[in-house]
Image (tube, grey):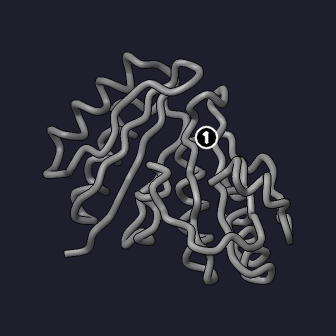
């Protein structure tokens, strides 16, 4: 059995809650988050066996597609994804700073997974649509070349769906900036 995560993002709370219920009734999955995010969107993040996650997400897409903003299913997500969602990754050495910003919560998780699997970087934080008017961002750190490669790969992954907004690499951020981010 393959471990997977999936997410759906809806325009309205009503459809999002209905989708969450359908997701949980479709297959045996673990509900990680089901909540309202800015600006009144609703996200459902789940985990489980790959086939169960796929079935649940597909049922949600089919039943409530008219209100769907974005979604994904990732088999074998990078292990640093969940700590980054909760801002719990312990960063031992801050180096170059990479930033990716997207239009949706779902797309930033896909970007983070691509970045983390591309090169040796540490995910710092994934901000999923909270306090961002529905946008999301990712902070990561590592050697400059690794951060550049990770950001390039993340950007490419979310550009294909039109959800990419912006990205930056700061080779040597000021210590005061690091203190405010960590």
21 is higher (above) or lower (below) than 150: above
Q: Nearer the viewer, residue 95 or 120?
A: 95
Residue 134 place in picture, x, y as percent: 62, 30
Residue 12 place in picture, x, y as percent: 47, 19
Provide the residue designation for mark 1. Answer: 104
How many discs mark residues in the rendered view?
1
Residue 1 place in picture, x, y as percent: 19, 75
Find numbered disc 1 in the image and state the secondary structure of the residue it sits on: loop
Residue depicted at x 46% and y 62%: 81
If the image is split into quadrants, where does the C terminus sit? bottom right
Q: Quadrant of residue 2?
A: bottom left
Position of 26 with respect to 147 (left or right) is left
Residue depicted at x 38% and y 29%: 35
26 is higher (above) or lower (below) than 35: below
Residue depicted at x 74% and y 63%: 98
Position of 56 with respect to 72 (left or right) is left
Position of 151 with respect to 131 (left or right) is right
Residue depicted at x 85% and y 60%: 174
Assess disc 1: are there few (<14), some (14-19) or many (≥20) residues with their C-alpha within 10 Å of its C-alpha. many
Q: Nearer the viewer, residue 21 or 118?
A: 118
Q: Quadrant of residue 130?
A: top right
Position of 25 with respect to 87 (left or right) is left
């Amino acid at each position: 059995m393959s471990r997977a995560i999936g997410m759906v993002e809806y325009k309205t709370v009503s459809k999002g809650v209905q989708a969450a219920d359908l997701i949980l009734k479709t297959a045996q999955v673990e509900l990680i988050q089901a909540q309202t995010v800015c600006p009144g969107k609703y996200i459902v993040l789940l985990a489980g066996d790959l086939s169960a996650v796929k079935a649940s997400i597909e049922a949600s897409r089919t039943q409530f597609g008219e209100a769907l903003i974005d979604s994904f299913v990732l088999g074998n997500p990078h292990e640093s994804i969940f700590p980054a969602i909760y801002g719990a990754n312990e960063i031992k050495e801050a180096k170059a700073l990479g930033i990716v910003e997207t239009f949706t919560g779902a797309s930033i998780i896909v970007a983070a997974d691509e970045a983390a699997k591309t090169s040796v970087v540490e995910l710092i934080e994934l901000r999923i649509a909270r306090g961002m008017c529905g946008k999301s961002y990712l902070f990561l750190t590592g050697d400059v070349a690794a951060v550049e490669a990770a950001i390039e790969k993340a950007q490419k992954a979310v550009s294909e769906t039109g959800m990419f907004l912006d990205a930056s690499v700061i080779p040597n951020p000021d210590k005061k900036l690091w203190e405010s981010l960590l």
